[in-house]
Structure formats: structure tokens, C-alpha cells
Image: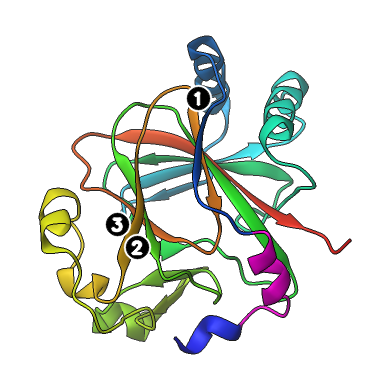
Amino acid sequence: MKQQNFFQNIDLIKSNESDPQVINLFSLEEIKDILKFYNDLPLSTFNEKQKIKKKHWILGLNRKMDDFIISKINKVISNWKVDNMYSKEEAFGIFHESFNPIKLHVDTGKDKNKIIYKQILIPLTDTGDTILFEPRWYGPSSTFTIEKDELRKNTGYNLRTNDHIGKLDFDKKFYKKYLNHENYNNLKGLKVKKIYEWKLGEALIFDRTFIHCASDLKKPKTGLTIFFYREKN
């Protein structure tokens, strides 16, 4: 993988890595409060091609909700800083309402000097799966594709690349069950690390170096993702 030496502090990044973790973090009433807050936020992005709506958790609009989510994060992650890479405003994560499955990508960011850390996925609907893959990716934020048109255009925040492709064929049984929306050849060289079935009240915590995507989506789903980095001690 040509992009694997993008970050300046790869050793520090790797020293903070761990296996993905699923935890019970919210009550159903708290999930309802987050959804109400989400519905009151202004729309940031509506990508009609990908069929996904995005809203940023804008800090300061509701101090009570800000304090609530920060207190929850402090219970499960220490020494964190929020990485605000996808928003020009001061934000605490991204709400994403998906009508199509989100394809293969990684959320490592584009600041090579940062010590990227964890990201948290908080399901706000109980539908769909998130699938994490190995090997890990130590390049900039990327969307992975073998489509020539996408590679040629290469627009947007994420790099469009096929540099993730390896030699081993992907598990065909798993592909047929979960990943029919992806080009099978786009998964060549990847192995499934974890499949997480979305459940209300839970949170999935995983390293930002994990390539991931959604399973084949049967109905719309809404989630909140927050990205973190660490400062040098």
C-alpha cells in the first residue's frame, strides 16, 4: 500500500490501537433525546448521489446536550480531542441518515501531523450493520474504489484510491450475505475483522485506521459518529 506512511507519528498511532469494542452507553430515553436534538439541527449536506443526509453536532446550540454527550464520552475514552475534520464550524461529530449503504472508506483525516485515535459510532436506529476490515490503513481519509471514472475525477474530501487492493480473494459467502452493493473485486485482499449489528443504546468504538463500510441496506438508518485524536504527552 503506497499510502501507508502518510502520518508522521505512526508509531504513536499504533501504540494506542486496540480491538473494536461494543458497549452499552445510552438508555432508550437518552436515544430519543439525541434524535430530537438531531431533528432540530440544520442540514449540512444532502448527497443525492450517495443518498445520505449529514448534520453536524454544532456546539453551543444546546449546552445541556453538549454536556450530556461529553460526559458519556468521558466514561469510555480518556485523553481525547475531537477531530473536527469534516466541518468548518465547531462541531462534535456528524449525524448521518443513510438511504443507501455507505461504501468502503476510512476516516483517518488529512492532517499528517495528528495522532489519530478512536471513533465512536452511535446507532440511532436499530437497522443495518457496520463491517470493519483488515489490514489497517495509515494513509489519508479515503474512499476505496476500482471504478476508473471515480479514480479519475477524485473529487471531494476523501482521496479516491484503489491502493487497498491485495492478492487474496475475499470471502464469497460473506460477500453474498452482506456486501452485494460493493464490487466483489473491490474487496480483494481484505479480511473481515468485525461485523457490528446496530442496536439502540450501544456504541461501537474502533480505531480510525480500520477500513469499513455498511452492509447491504434494507431500510434507512441514522447514526452519530464522533472522531478523536490525541496530543503528544
Does 9 appear above or below 95? below
Does 61 appear above or below 212? above
Q: What residue type is disc 3 on?
A: Lys
Does 75 appear above or below 81? above
Residue corresponding to mark 2: 104
Q: Which residues are magenta?
A: 6-16
- Asked where in the image residue 140 lies, by quadrant, the reply is bottom right
Question: Mark 1 and mark 3 in contact (Cβ < 8 Å)?
Answer: no
| Front label number (2 vs 3) | 2
Residue corresponding to mark 1: 39
Residue corresponding to mark 3: 49
Question: Mark 3 and mark 2 in contact (Cβ < 8 Å)?
Answer: no
Q: Quadrant of the C terminus?
A: bottom right
Q: Which residue lies at the image location 53% right of the left edge and 45% below the top edge?
A: 44
The CA span between labels 2 and 3 is 15 Å
Q: Position of residue 166 (x, y in %)?
A: 30, 82
* Sequence-first disc among 2 and 3: 3
Q: What residue type is disc 1 on?
A: Asn
Give yes or no for residue 19 being in the magenta stretch. Answer: no
